[in-house]
Image (cartoon, rainbow, N blue to C red):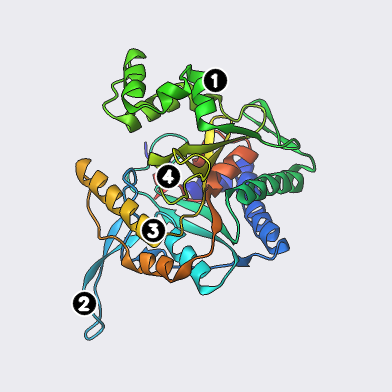
């Protein structure tokens, strides 16, 4: 029997309708939070000439076909994030910006936390770093909790999440020591970490394999229990678009926040060096080739913008659907999306 369409389910299920109405209130409250702090809301393209280079993401490709005399045909892509465009706005002189936008990632179906089309919140502060973004995120979640429930905690799947206290701050190496019994000496040595992962029964062939197999199986589900966890200072090999820690170049100024074992966001002290950014993008391109993934040109327009001079900045990408799922005590983001992928 065919599944009932979502609009019919919404009509017949008052609890689902109430959940979706609360979704609209949460998104409105997110905007109010940033407006109250004098952030400017931006609006950047979701259809672009070149996608991001992240090795573990798959993109949606489409084809531009112009009217006669309207240019040449070319491949175009739906964004996985508005990051590049927003950083160009930092270069243009905007100092505090945010955006709530649709983002798209292919091959992201199944499970409770993924939908190919999803809602992303990103914000950036010029003349700042990831520590200020940590504070922003704490304040945002606390604000939404108070707005919804008039208190500083909420229930998710039978567990109380306290946001009144400062969030737990835990370095990545501390999480490996605490939950997986991996010492700093082993963690910082590629061969020894691979060997440690293999001894645990994981089929690890390189550092990233070892890291993620241990992290996903032994650490992630323990983070953010009772109160949110800010997991920070990732290995420099996973720096992505973040700056290296000045005091310890083995690590990057990057953090993620976890609530009840669910990853909510990814944030950086943003890399502003165009040459270093170009080098990292070429490395990611080579990694994509090794993985057998489609290859794209490096976005030279983005690198040109960095070369023009982007201020020292902090920035973050936060999954709005996941945040709403957590706040409204739902066990899947499909329950907080008006038309999830399964209903298309």
Q: Earlier in the sequence, mark 1 or mark 2?
A: 2
Give coordinates of residue 213: x percent, y percent: 37, 25
Q: Are marks 1 and 2 in contact (CB under 8 Å)?
A: no
Per the model, the C-alpha gap separating discs 4 and 1 is 22 Å
In the picture as drawn, the residue positioned furthest to the right comes out as: 150
Q: Is residue 82 visible?
A: no
193 lies above or below 87: above
Residue identifier under label 4: 239
Q: Is residue 210 visible?
A: yes
Residue at (56, 59) in percent of width and height: 124
Residue identifier under label 3: 79
Q: Nearer the viewer, residue 28 or 162?
A: 162
Q: Earlier in the sequence, mark 1 or mark 3?
A: 3
Residue at (54, 42) in percent of width and height: 322
- Which tag is nearer the camera, tag 1 or tag 3? 1
Residue at (37, 64) in percent of width and height: 303
Q: Nearer the viewer, residue 18 or 38?
A: 38
- The kind of secondary structure element at disc 1 is helix
Per the model, the C-alpha gap separating discs 1 and 3 is 37 Å
Q: Label 3: how many residues lie within 10 Å, few (<14), some (14-19) or many (20+)?
A: many
Residue 46 sits in quarter = bottom left
- The kind of secondary structure element at disc 2 is loop
Residue identifier under label 1: 178
Per the model, the C-alpha gap separating discs 1 and 2 is 56 Å
- The kind of secondary structure element at disc 4 is loop
Compared across the picture, whether 258 is left or right of 186 comes to: right
């Amino acid at each position: 029997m065919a599944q009932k369409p979502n609009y019919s389910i919404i009509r017949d299920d008052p609890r689902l309708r109430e959940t979706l109405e609360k979704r609209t209130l949460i998104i409105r409250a997110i905007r109010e939070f940033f407006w109250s702090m004098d952030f400017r809301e931006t609006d950047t393209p979701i259809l672009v000439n070149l996608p991001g280079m992240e090795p573990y993401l798959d993109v949606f490709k489409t084809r531009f076909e112009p009217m006669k005399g309207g240019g040449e045909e070319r491949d175009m892509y739906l964004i996985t994030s508005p990051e590049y465009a927003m950083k160009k706005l930092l270069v243009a002189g905007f100092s505090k910006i945010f955006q709530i936008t649709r983002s798209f990632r292919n091959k992201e179906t199944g499970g409770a936390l993924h939908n190919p089309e999803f809602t992303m919140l990103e914000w950036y502060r010029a003349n700042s770093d990831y520590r200020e973004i940590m504070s922003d995120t704490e304040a945002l979640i606390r604000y939404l909790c108070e707005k919804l429930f008039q208190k500083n905690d909420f229930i998710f799947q039978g567990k109380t999440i306290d946001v009144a206290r400062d969030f737990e701050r835990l370095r990545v190496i501390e999480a490996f020591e605490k939950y997986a019994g991996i010492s700093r000496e082993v963690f910082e040595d590629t061969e020894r970490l691979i060997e440690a992962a293999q001894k645990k029964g994981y089929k690890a062939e390189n550092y990233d394999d070892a890291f993620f197999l241990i992290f996903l199986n032994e650490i992630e589900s323990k983070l953010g229990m009772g109160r949110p966890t800010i997991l920070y200072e990732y290995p420099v090999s996973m720096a992505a678009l973040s700056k290296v820690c000045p005091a310890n170049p083995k690590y990057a100024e990057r953090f993620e926040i976890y609530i009840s074992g669910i990853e909510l966001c990814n944030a950086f002290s943003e890399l502003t060096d165009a040459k270093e950014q170009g080098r990292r993008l070429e490395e990611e391109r080579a990694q994509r080739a090794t993985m057998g993934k489609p290859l794209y040109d490096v976005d030279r327009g983005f690198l040109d913008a960095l070369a023009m001079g982007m201020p020292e900045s902090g920035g973050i990408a936060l999954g709005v659907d996941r945040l709403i799922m957590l706040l409204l005590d739902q066990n899947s983001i499909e329950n907080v999306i008006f038309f999830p992928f399964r209903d298309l």
